[in-house]
Amino acid sequence: MFQKGDLCKHFKGETLVEKNIYEVLETGVIYTGECEGMQGSLVVYRNVFQEGKVFTREERDLLAELSPDKQEKFHQRTRVEKLTPEEIATIQTEAFKQAKLAYMQQKMEEKREAEAQTER
């Protein structure tokens, strides 16, 4: 179960720098619309390193267990996991923040290059 203020990591990415890091903004949110299949409580979370990236998802989806091959590849048991105290200390260092920024800039450049190739 997640709690407001938890810092978490998404499974994709082989290192902490490559993973999306989220802060839980709210838990226990109830969807009142008419979307079929929406059953559980929602978690609202934001990407710590990207402005304006706020998401919501059913908590059960965030806690879904990964297949054994994905667990081995990404070193996580579930789709989203809370950061350990050591990981929290790591993401707060200046070295990590610089490495994360460089990684994100590299990914944006790769995306622009791919889009430019598509336009040609």
Image (cartoon, rainbow, N blue to C red):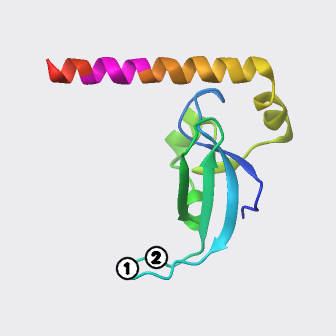
Bin the neighbour count of mark 1 within 10 Å (Cα to Cα): few under 14, some 14-19, many 20 and up. Answer: few
Bin the neighbour count of mark 2 within 10 Å (Cα to Cα): few under 14, some 14-19, many 20 and up. Answer: some
Quadrant position of residue 11:
top right
- The residue lying furthest to the left in this view is 120
* Residue at 69% in and 55% down: 24
Q: Amino acid at mark 1?
A: Glu
* Residue at 72% in and 61% down: 2
Residue 36 or 51: which is nearer the viewer? 51
Quadrant position of residue 114:
top left
Region rendered in magenta: 109-115
Quadrant position of residue 13:
top right
Element marked by disc 2: loop
Whole-Å distance between the Cαs marked 1 and 2? 6 Å
Instruction: Report the side of 34 relative to 15 (left or right).
Output: left
What secondary structure is the magenta-colored segment mainly? helix
Q: Is residue 14 above or below residue 47?
A: above
Any magenta on residue 15?
no
Residue 46 or 72: which is nearer the viewer? 46
Q: Whole-percent x and y of residue 50?
A: 58, 37
Q: Amino acid at mark 2?
A: Met
Instruction: Report the side of 39 relative to 102 (left or right).
Output: left
Q: Name the residue carrying label 1.
A: 36
Element marked by disc 1: loop
Q: Whole-percent x and y of residue 33?
A: 44, 81
Quadrant (top left, top right, bottom left, bottom right) of the C terminus: top left
* Residue at 38% in and 19% down: 110
Which of the labelled discs sits on residue 38, or is there none? 2
